[in-house]
Image: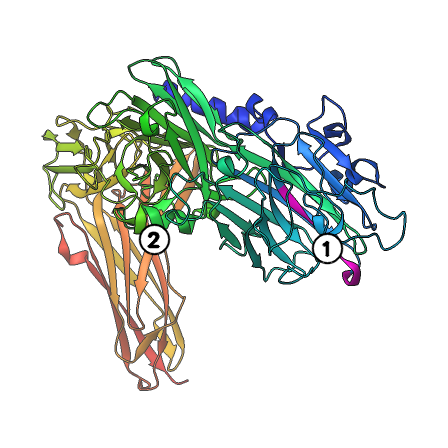
Amino acid sequence: MKVAISRFAIVAVIAGLTALVGVPPVLAQVPNFPSGFSSGDLCPGEGCSIAVNGSTLDSGDAPWTPNVPDGTSVLRLTDAVANQRGSTWFTTAQPVTKSWNTTFQFTLSGAPATQGDGFAFVVQNNGLTALGGFGSGLGYGTRFFDPCPVEGSCVPAGSDSGIPSSLAIEFDTYQNAWDPDNQHIAIQSCGTSANSPNHSDSCFIAEASTAVPFANGLSHTVRISYTPPTCSEGSCPPTLFVYLDEATHPTPVLAAYVNIDSKLNLDGTSAYVGFTAATRGAFEAHDISAWTFIPSQTQTVSAGGDGTTFNFGDYNYTAKLNSGDDVNVQVTPVLKSQTDCNTLVQKTFAGAQCFVYNNADGLGGHFAVMFEVTCPDSPGGRCGTNADPSFDAELGSKYVFDKAFNPGYRPLPDQNPLPGWLKGQPADTVHPCNPNPSNTPGLFQSNQIESFGVVGDPIATTKGKSGGTGSCWVATYNTPNELPSVAGTIPANGANYPQGTTVLSNFSCTSVNTLIANPNSAVGPYLTVPPSVQVQDPPIPPVLGCSVSLDGAVPVALTPTTQIPTTPGSHTFVATVTDSATDAVSTQTINYNVVGPTDVAILKVGPLTAPIKSKVTYVIGLGDIGSQPAVDVNVSDLLPANTTLVAGSVSASKVSCAIVNKKLVCTTTPVNCSTTSTSVSCSVGTLQPLSLSSLNGATIKLMVLLGNALTTGKVVKNTATVSATNTDTHTGNNSSTASTLLTAH
């Protein structure tokens, strides 16, 4: 029988594979250059992805140059030449007044003694030809040094002013009078007026020196995360974070309160994003080697169908209404380190870990992703309320994750992944992933997971149900209080059942139907134990529902009327429940026996004589000469006084021989033995009856050292015994002694 796969999972996987093999159409409208640039991306006219101006357009190798050795191209803002300035703008304006993340890689190279002046990431509303000043203006601000040192070496007066309606995050490599040093990061904006790089005037927002020497000719990665504030300055946490080489320096190098919408008077509209750079007497090459920009997305979500997919590169978010009218839903991915995400999650769900998505920033970075889900046309951005759950929806995420970046993940079938789909209950409904003040109460108050699955290595799909507001969502593993349970009374562990009788199992499987940390905050989630799936050989783990594995065989559906085998021998009965989140727990592992009487015999042989202080080898043979298989056969050998087992000398195996095509064919199976310096114990397991046509048995070989206290003429007797669970019809052959006469050394 085939395992049923939900339509949601199929859509999620197809969407995921589409994202992996080709850029979704939505990405054509945002900066998405994870592997560098080409000359076709950059030009001064229409039809290009990036508009270029100034020195970026007409100096040397600019605007692009091969990035040896991988053959991709870098966006060169300026060459390492004096008196240059350049700007580049993505030709489609971006929704910068909403939440966004941007990640880029840069290299600054030049003679250390003459490096300057730096570059900036800029948000501006002044068009695709916007360009600021030389030198200290960094291509976005007004240059503050006049007149030109050499007549004719500078541009005409008036063309060296800053970009109006712009906000710049500058990476400054030249120390001017207002700068703290020659390698710092700062945020500057003069609102709708021409921007200025002067940290001493009203355009200054924040600055920070950094321990990372970024003007060193090496590649560095920057991530800028922005969330628009919803309260007055000073009463909200910072809304713009700047990370530099986050993989090794996970703490932001700069954090500031910024309201881009009001600062640039955008009135909720979009603006252009890009880079500027400049040189003057000091100079360096300013290169951008990769760039991605991930804004929020708004789409219409309808009832029925396969749902709406919000693609963010190598992962997505999917929403589908179960009922109700179409609604505009805004989804914003919020990238965080696993540590920062865990801090929010573990306030309520102790021990839970946020999944780290592969390539979450589009440049190969690995981050936890929280999703802000709001309905911008509704009051407060809410998508319904708990009292009026008009937003009755199925919500999910498809993503790729690497187990190396999720070290605590415990995959099936050996362990339990305990995946979660946590829903936040925020104080800030417009930006629901903003932590509550002092993280009290904890942002995430309920686990809404319905299903979880992985394919490949691995592509994961997490799905849950929203019984009210859109809120904040995050995928987790090791989520507590989630395991289903299985309980039963038949068969009983260690019990013996008569051969040939009918014994019916008595088991029940249940899921955890309510996984709510705070019962007053949410409804759900909706884990279930699906009907058992009969899986044919080879097995397809995991088997959903309530199943049983008999003697390690392929799992089959478990019902209260499942008949346990009563064939002679030892049996293992493992009852397992797997819920719709693939949380599996084997709480009932039963070992029972169906046995008949038999006769187990043992023979131990060794040398008749041996010199004192020598090593003596013993061989033990055993077999079942009765009519029934001997189960749980164990051999014990307690060594005589003044003898010691030679370490590593024990070897044991079961032997089965038969006549095949008039030839004797034998197979061996290793036997586990435990040893001390004075004893050997081997668990042989089951022995089939010995006959002329079927030669079954076991052999054990060991070596002992005769001790110094032994004397010539003494007889050393070494006795081995055999036992089995069966009733033994003849106990006289359950032990065997090898006698050895000691001779002179």
Distance CA(mark 2)–CA(mark 1) = 62 Å
User: Of tags 2 and 1, which is closer to the observer?
Assistant: 1
Q: Which mark is residue 614?
A: none
Q: Which mark is residue 671?
A: 2
Region rendered in magenta:
112-121
* SS label for mark 1: loop
Q: Which mark is residue 217?
A: 1
Residue shown at 80% from the left, 45% from the top: 84
Q: Nearer the viewer, residue 224 or 506?
A: 224
Q: Is residue 392 left or right of residue 356?
A: left
Would you say the residues marked 2 and 1 are in contact, meaning their CB atoms lie under 8 Å apart? Answer: no
Q: Is residue 342 left or right of residue 34?
A: left
Residue shown at 57% from the left, 37% from the top: 362
Tag 2: amino acid: Val
Q: Quadrant of residue 431?
A: top left
- Residue 626, percent from left and from top: 19, 44
In magenta stretch: residue 117 = yes
Tag 1: amino acid: Gly
**Figure check: 112 above or below 689:** below
Within-10-Å neighbours for mark 2: few <14, some 14–19, many 20+: some
In magenta stretch: residue 64 = no
Q: Nearer the viewer, residue 212 or 730?
A: 212
Q: Is residue 368 visible?
A: yes
Q: Quadrant of the C terminus?
A: bottom left
Within-10-Å neighbours for mark 1: few <14, some 14–19, many 20+: some
- Residue 430, percent from left and from top: 36, 33
Residue shown at 58% from the left, 60% from the top: 209
